[in-house]
Amino acid sequence: MSADFELPPGDRLPIGGTPLQCKLAAAAIDLFHAQGVPGTTVRQITAACDLTPGALYNHFTSKDYLLYVLVRDIHHSVDEQMASAIASAGPEPAEQLTAAARFLVSHTAEHKKRSRVANRDFTLLVGSRREEIRAIRRRIRDRFTEILIAGAEQGAFDIAGGNDRPGAALASGAITNMCVHISQWTLEHYPLGIPDLTERYAAMALRIAGAAKGNEQIARAGKS
């Protein structure tokens, strides 16, 4: 069973779910991650929980709906926690950018299975469900964009790609993708641990932003 089921209540999936819903969700994350959503059956999910196949339908209307709930709640959790990290970082754009990058990397590294399912399998959603997830993903990128614009306006950043909104949008997309799409090899074989990984990714984010004062500011922001 996935270790995610052992997380504190605020980090369990689905958000506000019952213990049995969380158990089904944890099994689904394990199976979706290992063999893909199309290759996973309702029978496999319920068997992993020692339940009959029909038991899933008492809690989720279908496998597709379960996927939607999981992907939605993972994205909502990331968005809310990243906003909190930014708000707690202080007023300086370099500190806010560091906090946001650190959070995304640490969340991806600490919750490898759920992160991979959310970022890979949201594309299997259709219609309004897919558009809802896209809106949350845009909101996450926009948080980076606003930090970058603020830093450029203050003279703290010289953004690769330009110190205007299009340049900030390009840079925010690069930083977001870099942080949430850490390779499986890196997650499994990186020799120095998650804290070092988050510091290095934060430093790379600051380089993309063109943080002023070069390595000195990068190092100082990384230690904040």
Image (cartoon, helix red, strand yellow):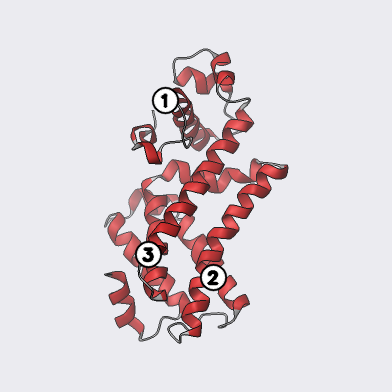
> Residue 180 vs residue 67: left or right?
left
Disc 1 is placed on an element classified as helix
- CB under 8 Å between callouts 2 and 3? no
Q: In this view, does 56 lie above or below 182?
A: above
Residue 15 pos. (x, y %) = 47, 37
The residue at the point 38 percent across, 76 percent down is 92
Residue 19, labelled with which disc?
Answer: 1
Residue 5 pos. (x, y %) = 38, 32
Picture quarter containing residue 60?
Answer: top right
Residue 11 visible in rendering: yes
Residue 64 pos. (x, y %) = 63, 32
Q: Which residue is under mark 2?
A: 145
Q: In this view, does 175 lie above or below 25?
A: below
The first of marks 2 and 1 along the sequence is 1
Report the quarter where the C terminus lies. bottom left
Residue type for callout 3? Ala
Q: How crowded is mark 2: few (under 14 residues within 10 Å), some or many (20 or more)?
A: many
Residue 79 pos. (x, y %) = 49, 54
Residue 38 visible in rendering: no
> Residue 80 vs residue 187: left or right?
right
The first of marks 1 and 3 along the sequence is 1
Distance of mark 2 from mark 1, alpha carbons?
Answer: 38 Å
Disc 2 is placed on an element classified as helix
